[in-house]
Image (spheres, grey):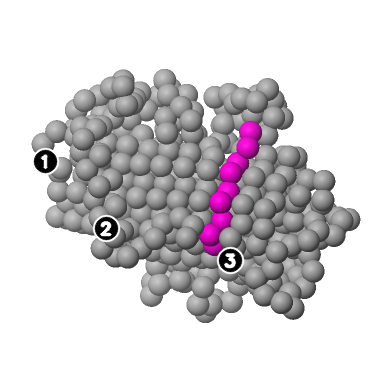
């Protein structure tokens, strides 16, 4: 865990209410080191990829809102365990690190946290949100909530130090939960994530890695609009990424596996390799999702890494140190149309406990089909009175 500097000059912070404790900031780089709870709003920027724009070094509740962040490293970083962080109405932009082999920074990264609430933010060219291990009370009302955000070009290519990037990448996601185990009240919903080919480098847009909800309160991934997931090298056939990975990673015991995850009412479009998948774990379900891909770049060039719309497959069967647990993973009532080499490859479910009432998308899958899904998304937001992004 990287800790922010404690030898920082005082900086004037715009506060949402009086009586808030002081924070420290580096005036030269205009970064913020939060050492006391409260609500913070302002503009901060870091030109040093090793220095986060904002570091949270307190276990008191912190709200970061109505702010603009720019940086060459992580934009928001938890510097201690047991952080309780809310981020809302923030405009965030990731900048190329300009250090050889240095990856783009995360929008927010935290480990051993107590609660993370990320709502209605705008993310441009960041490496997304990374959350490792939950350390809060087991019956908390808010554990992880990521809703109403707009993200463009989740980016993992490594810097070439000359203001550009190469084709080597780190594995980054819009959201990754890593070993966040047996935690209720996790919700990832109503987010809009778009990735442009040649200008992004995402792995799975949403990845649940060795993480789990509970039988009574599964991890809920719903009503997200995801358009695009591409390898940094568009000519490569070697790409493991895709749309929503409900369960990933192997463990020596069931407690360490992904479990109790449900994905529903999502629109997943043109996410190369796969749309929605279950590759490990147990008690995971995908239902009522709309999964589509033309299998090509905008100019019609087929993508070598293209694979399948949805899959349920025990990927750890042959390589597990111990016999892997893979059970009760299912899908129903999904609507899928997926092209690979201009042929339909809608789903592959050799290890599904149940695969029922799923529908193959009728007719041709064209760019116009994808455009119609965007219109559907905008209509859905209006009908549900949901606002995506800062407001």
In the rendered image, residue 131, in percent from the top left (x then y), is placed at: 57, 56
Residue extent of the magenta highlight: 85-96
Q: Is residue 317 left or right of residue 89?
A: left
2 and 3 marks in contact (CB < 8 Å): no
- Judged from the image, the secondary structure of the residue bearing numbered disc 3 is strand
Q: Residue at x 87, y 56 (%)?
A: 9
Label 2 belongs to which residue? 380
Q: Report the residue at 27% width, 36% height from top.
A: 293
**Percent x, y of residue 367:** 24, 33
Answer with left or right where residue 310 lies relative to residue 318. left
Helix, strand or loop for disc 1: loop
Q: Which residue is pictured at 58% across the width and 24% down the height?
A: 166
Is residue 182 shown to the viewer in this render?
Answer: no
Q: CA distance from mark 3 to mark 1?
A: 43 Å
Taking the spot 37% from the left edge, 28% from the top edge, the residue there is: 305
First in sequence, mark 2 or 3: give its number.
3
Horizontal and vertical percent for residue 97? 68, 34
Query: Do the CB atoms of the residues marked 2 and 1 lie less than 8 Å apart?
Result: no
Q: Which residue is mark 3?
A: 86
Which residue is the site of mark 1? Answer: 362
Tell me the crowding category of disc 2: few under 14, some 14 to 19, or many 20 or more residues within 10 angstroms, Cα based: few
Residue 95 colored in magenta in the image: yes
């Amino acid at each position: 865990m990287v800790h922010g500097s404690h030898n920082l000059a005082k900086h004037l912070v715009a506060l949402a209410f009086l009586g808030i404790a002081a924070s420290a900031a580096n005036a030269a780089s205009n970064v913020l080191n939060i050492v006391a709870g409260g609500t913070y709003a302002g503009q901060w920027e870091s030109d040093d990829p090793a220095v986060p724009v904002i570091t949270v070094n307190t276990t008191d509740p912190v709200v970061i809102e109505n702010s603009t962040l720019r940086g060459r490293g992580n934009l928001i970083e938890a510097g201690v365990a047991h952080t309780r962080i809310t981020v809302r109405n923030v405009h965030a932009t990731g900048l190329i690190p300009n250090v050889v082999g240095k990856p783009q920074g995360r929008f927010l990264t935290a480990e051993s946290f107590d609660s993370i609430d990320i709502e209605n933010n705008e993310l441009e060219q960041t490496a997304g949100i990374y959350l490792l291990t939950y350390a809060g009370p087991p019956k908390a009302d808010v554990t992880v909530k990521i809703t109403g955000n707009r993200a463009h070009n989740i980016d993992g290519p490594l810097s070439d130090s000359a203001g550009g990037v190469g084709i080597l990448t780190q594995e980054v996601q819009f959201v990754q939960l890593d070993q966040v185990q047996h935690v209720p009240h996790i919700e990832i919903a109503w987010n809009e994530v778009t990735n442009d080919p040649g200008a992004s480098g995402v792995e799975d847009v949403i990845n649940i890695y060795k993480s789990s909800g509970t039988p009574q309160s599964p991890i809920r991934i719903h009503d997200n609009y995801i358009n695009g997931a591409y390898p940094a090298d568009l000519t490569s056939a070697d790409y493991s990424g895709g749309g929503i990975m409900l369960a990933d990673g192997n463990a020596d015991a069931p407690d360490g596996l992904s479990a109790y995850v449900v994905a529903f009412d999502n629109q997943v479009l043109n996410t190369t390799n796969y749309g929605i998948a279950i590759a490990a774990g147990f008690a995971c379900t995908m239902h009522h999702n709309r999964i589509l891909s033309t299998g090509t770049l905008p100019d019609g060039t087929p993508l070598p890494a293209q694979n399948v719309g949805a899959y349920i497959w025990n990927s750890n069967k042959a390589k597990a140190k111990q016999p892997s647990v893979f059970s009760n993973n299912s899908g129903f009532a999904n609507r899928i149309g997926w092209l690979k080499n201009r042929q339909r490859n809608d789903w592959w479910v050799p290890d599904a406990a149940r695969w029922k009432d799923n529908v193959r998308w009728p007719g041709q899958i064209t760019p116009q089909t994808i455009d119609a899904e965007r219109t559907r998304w905008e209509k859905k937001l209006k009908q549900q009175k949901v606002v995506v992004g800062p407001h």
